Image: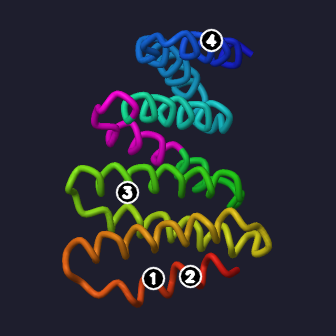
Amino acid sequence: LGTVNMMRALQVEMRRGADPRASLDQVLGFLDRALAINPGLVPAQVNRATCSAVRAEYEIARGLDPRSSLDAAAAGLEKVLAVGPMVMPLLNNLGNVHYRRGLWEAGHGIDPRASYAQVVKACEQAIAASPSLPQAYNLMGAAWAGVAKYQVSHGVDPGPDLARAVAAYEQ
């Protein structure tokens, strides 16, 4: 309950346009203490990943490098997924974290293909768990389209990856 209240206060702070990083650090410290006591506390790990993703979005919006925050978000989600069942929302969140990293990398002249490969991996796992949910197919299509865009900008034929994007979107 304490984390929920802190997250609500953080949302209010962000709506007011304030820099949320100090508050996020407080929430992350609280969650780290909870995880030190009980490393298997899944809600704390999910909340930790959420805080890191929120921090990354703030950093992206301000032109800051979000990679360490995105890495922390991905690591937290991967820890949860390693001990529990492959849950579509968590896999989708993991894919979205890697997708945001890929977008940032592409926009800053960094090869995004490794990040987009992680998106595809998360989407494939999500599809294996829930083949009828469209979010994974859409995200996978966006990742393949991102790879194709990168290839075009580097003089590489994007045809095969565009075909993968189309195939994912058509599911």
Q: Position of residue 115 (x, y in %)?
A: 37, 61
Q: Position of residue 146 (x, y in %)?
A: 40, 67
Which amino acid type is shown beneath numbered disc 1? Leu
Label for residue 166?
A: 2
Left or right of 93, for residue 65: left
For mark 4, what is the residue?
A: 12
- SS class of the residue under badge 2? helix
Which amino acid type is shown beneath numbered disc 2? Val
Circle 1/circle 2 CB separation < 8 Å: yes
| Magenta span includes 59 | no
Q: Which residue occupies 55% across, 65% down?
A: 122
For mark 1, what is the residue?
A: 162
Select label 2 or label 4 by which is in front: 2
Label for residue 32?
A: none
Of labels 1 and 3, earlier in sequence is: 3
Q: Position of residue 24 (x, y in %)?
A: 48, 19
* Quarter occupied by residue 59: top left
| Magenta span includes 67 | yes
Q: Is residue 148 above or below residue 42?
A: below
For mark 3, what is the residue?
A: 102
